Amino acid sequence: MGGGVAVRVLLLGVGNILLSDEGVGVKVIEQLEARYSFPPEVTLVDGGTMGLELLPYFEECSHLFLLDAIRGEAPPGTLEVSELADPPAYFRQKISPHQIGLSEVLAVASLQECLPALVKLFGIVPEDLSTGLSLSASNAAAVEAAVAAVLIELANLGLSASPRV
């Protein structure tokens, strides 16, 4: 990579898997881990509802890909991919308590100057936030779309995943 900054990507799935679609980000990480092998520049983390424990992961990466359920006007199961200009602000008023914690972690990372230069959100609009371990049909289908979108974004950075046999 010459004299440039090395690309290191953190794929971080967050959410509460006990609240149906709220755990969709974690489910995407599970599918990526189960189905693909990644180069050493890519780290996959099931962040669940973790908070400040995530900070050390941020220090190691140049790119953060966040996978999470998001509030939106789009139909349930819609995948929205966007680069976040102000990640801590984005998560201040979202769907669930874990996202308040995520906002704080991102704010601390920003203050400590370890917030990755690029933060991209892969957000899926939930259909069902009731207690339960299963995703709704719309969100289960969106997991596939998110997996494909993550693989494309990694390929755009010159990082390729290999399907597991």
Image: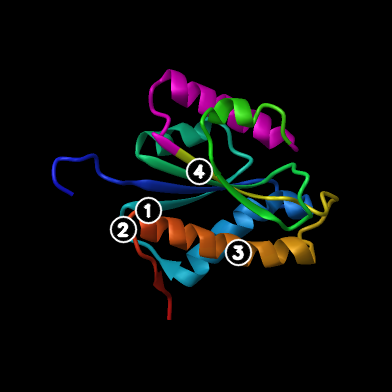
Q: Residue furthest top?
A: 111
The answer for how far apart the CA atoms under marks 2 and 4 are is 16 Å
User: x and y percent of residue 113 in the render?
Assistant: 38, 23
Return the residue found at the far left.
Answer: 2
* 122 is within the stretch colored magenta: no
Mark 3: secondary structure: helix
The residue at which mark 3 appears reads as 145
In terms of secondary structure, where does tag 2 sit? loop
Q: Are marks 2 and 4 in contact (CB under 8 Å)?
A: no
Q: Are marks 3 and 4 in contact (CB under 8 Å)?
A: no
Q: CA distance from mark 1 to mark 2?
A: 11 Å
The nearer-to-camera label among 1 and 2 is: 2
Circle 1 sits in a helix, a strand or a loop, which is it?
A: strand
The reply to whether discs 3 and 1 touch (Cβ–Cβ < 8 Å) is: no
Residue drawn at 76 percent across, 63 percent down: 138
The residue under label 1 is: 42
Q: Earlier in the sequence, mark 3 or mark 1?
A: 1
Label 1 vs 4, first from the N-terminus: 1
Q: Residue at x 84, y 51 (%)?
A: 131
Residue annotated with mark 4: 120
- Is 72 situated left or right of 56 in this image? right
Residue type (three-letter) at the residue carrying disc 4: Lys
- Name the residue at the bottom extreme: 165
Which residue is identified by label 2?
A: 158
Where is residue 142 drawn, in percent x and y? 67, 62
